[in-house]
Image: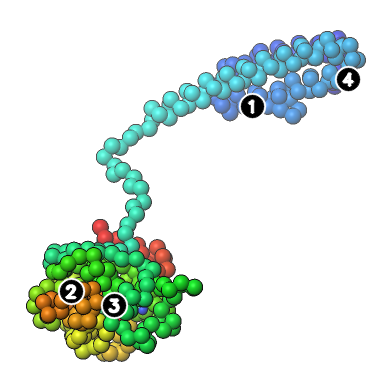
Amino acid sequence: MAPTSRAAWEQAYARVESALRSAGAASAADLPALEETRIRFLGRKGELTELLKALKDLPLEERKALGPKGNALKESFEAAIASRRAELEDAGDAASLKNETVDLTLPALRPPRGRLHPLTVTLREIADIFHRMGYDWAEGPFVEDERHNFSALNFPPDHPARDSQDTFYLEGLPLLLRTHTSTVQIRAMEASRPPIRVVCPGRVFRHEQTDVTHSAVFHQVEGLVVDRGAGFSDLKGHLQTFLEALLGRGTKTRFRPSYFPFVEPSAEVDVKCFLCPGSGCPACKRTGWIEILGAGVVHPKVLEGVGWDPEQWSGFAFGIGVERVAMLLHGVRDLRDFYVNDLRFLNQFDEDLA
Ligand code: FA5
């Protein structure tokens, strides 16, 4: 029964106060016991809660007199609970620290490791081999003019490669996205004097259908050597040295006659297909061979165009497809896998890049 008079309320107060004292919140043995005591007095139907609720049934004057008394009891109980809880928690932490052991011989946790993209690694690997063969490194812009991409390379004005079917032109400007890294041959020659020996790695762009060996954005490493008496046999020797360093001795390659307006004679180099034993598959278009580069002897008109005397200087050039090389090195069946950024694919290159 809730007390409805002052005297009854004060009697109830005395009972709760003595119960609080004997419950001894300040000496609760552990956190569950402390919580039990708190709920007994301050839970929704707790003894102290009920006592305070009963105030509302007393006349205003008495409520004013008794209210602070009740609240003070509640505050001191809450303070006792909070301080005992802090004590018990500290003791618990200390005890668990005491039981904890640290095994210093365990290996440390390693943060996830970033790594280079397999195409970046392949491109650097190609350039590194040429670097060891005495080649310097040169770079050029992605956005080019027609002169560097075509005219200076002896492409006639009506050559089909100039067609917007193959080339991305910039709207309203006499500029385009370079379709090959041969542009950098011209830039490198314009910026120096003969002799020269450079590789020019980078991204190129072609407006063409993608398939297992073709992408609209891909990478090439261009090579250019101009020296006195440099010719086709030097080209073959350099490419053979490069291919053996890259793919290992005994790798089957073949030179095929070809045509590029800026080199004469011209060749293309194929490597035996790595996916089928030469019998033919989608990657090699059923030929048993995969084309990885174009090459040839620098056309005299190209040398003349940059003011180098073709009577004194001659040279050779080549352009290697980086994606095709990466496919060969890693047995990748579809070149487009390099671009989708699927970590399940990229993580497979971990060991190669370590
Ligand atoms: C050229 O781009 C010439 N500039 C190469 C060259 C340089 C010839 C110097 C002579 C002297 P081609 O279009 O064939 O040639 O491309 C060269 C290589 O790039 C190819 O052998 C192939 O490995 C790669 N390639 C060509 N098209 C693509 C494509 N769409 N996607 C991926 N790789 C490609």
Determine the image quadrant of residue 59. Answer: top right
Three-letter residue code for mark 2? Trp
Between the C-alphas of marks 2 and 1, the distance is 97 Å
In the displayed structure image, the side of residue 264 where residue 227 appears, left or right: left
**Toward the viewer: 131 or 146?**
146
* Residue under the image location 40 percent in, 63 percent down: 343
Provide the residue designation for mark 3.
152
3 or 1: mark nearer the eye: 3
Which numbered disc, 4 or 1, marks the residue that appears first in the sequence? 1
Between the C-alphas of marks 4 and 1, the distance is 28 Å
Three-letter residue code for mark 3? Ala
Between the C-alphas of marks 3 and 1, the distance is 91 Å
Is the CB atom of the residue marked by disc 3 within 8 angstroms of ligand 1's nearest atom? no
Instruction: Judge whether 201 appears above or below 114 on screen.
Output: below
Provide the residue designation for mark 2.
308
Is the CB atom of the residue marked by disc 4 within 8 angstroms of ligand 1's nearest atom? no
Q: Mark 2 touching mark 4, by CB under 8 A?
A: no
Task: Classify mark 4: helix, strand or loop.
Answer: helix
In the displayed structure image, the side of residue 167 where residue 6 appears, left or right: right
Provide the residue designation for mark 4.
57
The type of colouring in the image is rainbow
Is residue 271 visible in the rendered image? The answer is: no
Q: Mark 4 touching mark 1, by CB under 8 A?
A: no
Number of marks in the rendered image: 4
Between the C-alphas of marks 3 and 2, the distance is 13 Å
Provide the residue designation for mark 1.
36
Instruction: Judge whether 56 appears above or below 226 on screen.
Output: above
Three-letter residue code for mark 1? Glu
